[in-house]
Image: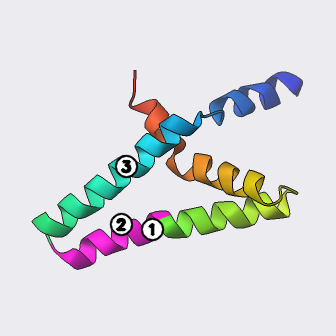
Amino acid sequence: MRASRGAVRNLFRVEMPVAHMGLAITIIASVLVGVAWSPRTGVIIAGAFAALFVVALAVALLAGSRGRDAVCAAYKFTFGWADWITP
């Protein structure tokens, strides 16, 4: 059980610069999609990430994190996927 929890913890361990890169990629992709297809589609993509952040923040608050720690945890969860595309 301990090894399983450690593996999950390592999976979600993300540094803040990686999360910033994920946010930047999301913004660029939303703008490009908004220009290429329609502004509404770009707003839908940005809104989906905003909704994911709000849900992650609610979960972090319910799990016992408070203030800045909860916001950082939600931010890393929402935009930490950039770690998978960076070398």
Q: Which residue is mark 2?
A: 45
Query: Mark 3 or mark 2, which is nearer to you?
Result: 3
Q: Is residue 39 magenta?
A: yes
> Where on the picture, by quarter, is residue 82?
top left
Placement of 37 over or under 77, stated as above or below: below
Q: Earlier in the sequence, mark 1 or mark 3?
A: 3
Q: Is residue 86 magenta?
A: no
Q: Which residue is mark 1?
A: 48
What residue is rendered at 27% in x and 54% in y?
28
The N terminus - image quarter: top right
Q: Earlier in the sequence, mark 3 or mark 2?
A: 3
Q: From which residue to which does the magenta span run?
A: 38-49
What residue is rendered at 20% in x and 68% in y?
34
Q: Mainly helix, strand or loop, the magenta region?
A: helix
What residue is rendered at 83% in x and 59% in y?
66
Q: Viewer-proximal residue, 15 or 37?
A: 15
Secondary element under disc 2, as helix, strand or loop, is: helix
Callout 1 touching callout 2 (CB < 8 Å): yes
Left or right: 68 in relation to 46? right
Q: Position of residue 21 (x, y in %)?
A: 42, 41
What residue is rendered at 43% in x and 51% in y?
23
